[in-house]
Image: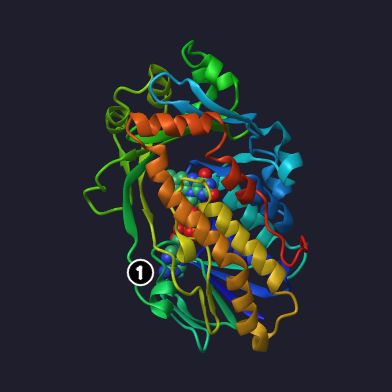
Amino acid sequence: MQIVVVGGGIGGLAAALGLRRAGHRVTVLERAREIAEVGAGIGLAPNAAAALGRLGVGHRLERTAVRPRFATRRRWQDGSDLFVDPLADVEERYGAPFWFAHRGDLQAALLAEAEDEPGVGEPVTVVLGAKCESVDAQTGVVLTAAGEYRADLVIGADGIRSAVRETVFGPVTPRYSGETGYRTQVQTDAALADPLLRDLVERNGFESWLGPNGHVVHCRFRGGREINVTACMQAPPISTGASAAQVDRSELMSALEGWSPVIRRLAELGGDVIRYDLFDIDPVESWVDGKVGLLGDAAHAMIPYLGQGAAQAIEDGEYLMRVFPGVDPSGVDGALKEYERGRKERAVKVQTTSRNNAGVFHMPDGPEQEARDARIRRGATDANIYDWLWRLPTRGGVAA
Ligand SMILES: Cc1cc2nc3c(=O)[nH]c(=O)nc-3n(C[C@H](O)[C@H](O)[C@H](O)COP(=O)(O)OP(=O)(O)OC[C@H]3O[C@@H](n4cnc5c(N)ncnc54)[C@H](O)[C@@H]3O)c2cc1C
């Protein structure tokens, strides 16, 4: 079949690769002039790493992704450990590692595998500067600024403000969570040279600090040479209405007022600070109609409080790889319904749990927070969801 994927982000490239592996001819339409991701890091939990492995991308990421030695939850004021999850046996438990990667490296790995000459199926074609204006779900015609495309199947992977979703399924208004993610990157050598930070950085963990007005996550990446720092803090939205903007470091430092000197020092050492306002959507009623299916943030945009937006998009792409082999145009409707049946319940659970986690992570200090911390110390808050989440489900009991 001839397939069009609208959007060349992590989700769109995973879908394109999955559908190529399923034996189809795939064109990706991307509105940007180049395929590029911001210089930030991304946590790839074992479910994402397993799906990437099945898509055949794992070997490319292995070179630069870091495997943190453990994951922690800490107190915001003094950094005391609430919980330490030794990730040493994670591969044994879930069949895949926990990776922390550079977003650009992930996107480049997906793109290289999709466009590579050798390998299963025809290389994927990527058309840049092709902004989708509308899609007809019955005919499979996609209108773009760069011309018209006709496809047997159209996958809408064009993000939270999806034009495909808007024209086929109607308007959905993204909701501002009331929180923003400040991202900055620190050179590991500079942090190791600082006596306040050396122990923390040498531990090589995936660290989360929980405070009353936000939480901060940091982890080494790019072969360990850099540290990605993300501070998700309560804030009014960016005044210009943009969803992302470069800001002065003082904005991040005042959001961290009163936090431990250790985490403040780490934030001070970072390069540029970019803030991303955190939006999500309510679960959408339907992901599929006629020749069109939604995927990734277009289908289930979520705030990153389980670190799973991209992971769920990659799972979507990997699922397409399993549903679409041997499907011809007459089977598209049935195969799309099977995709929705197989993926929606899980993705929506992750989406709604992520939203609820804002209240759990950002409790003001007091009796409720003390009760939460006691649960975290017993390992009682996270264990159930992560045990379910980090295990990549099989389709009908068959792995791939
Ligand atoms: C602060 C922060 C931290 C995060 N941390 C994690 C994490 O640790 N782990 C994790 O798994 N996830 C994380 N996420 C979530 C993750 O980044 C997203 O869920 C994921 O990138 C979504 O991928 P996508 O391809 O579906 O959408 P997008 O990344 O939005 O890509 C959509 C693509 O479509 C293109 N496009 C848009 N409109 C059109 C159009 N009309 N025509 C053609 N092309 C179009 C865009 O240019 C873009 O390339 C985080 C998010 C944030 C904000």
- Residue 273's place in the image compared with 156, above or below, is above
Which quadrant, please, contains the C terminus?
A: bottom right
Residue at x 41%, y 29% (from the top left corner): 370
Q: Amino acid at mark 1?
A: Val
Residue 204 is situated, as x and y percent measured from the top left of the image, at 60, 25
Taking 58 as reference, is 262 left or right? left
The color scheme shown is: rainbow
Residue 99 is situated, as x and y percent measured from the top left of the image, at 63, 40
Residue at x 59%, y 19% (from the top left corner): 202
Q: Residue furthest top?
A: 195
**Front position in the image: 343 or 128:** 343
- Viewer can see residue 3: yes
**Front position in the image: 71 or 386:** 386
- Residue 83's place in the image compared with 297, above or below, is above
Q: Which residue is mark 1?
A: 172
Residue 214 is situated, as x and y percent measured from the top left of the image, at 36, 36
Question: Is label 1 in a helix, a strand or a loop?
Answer: loop
**Front position in the image: 261 or 164:** 261
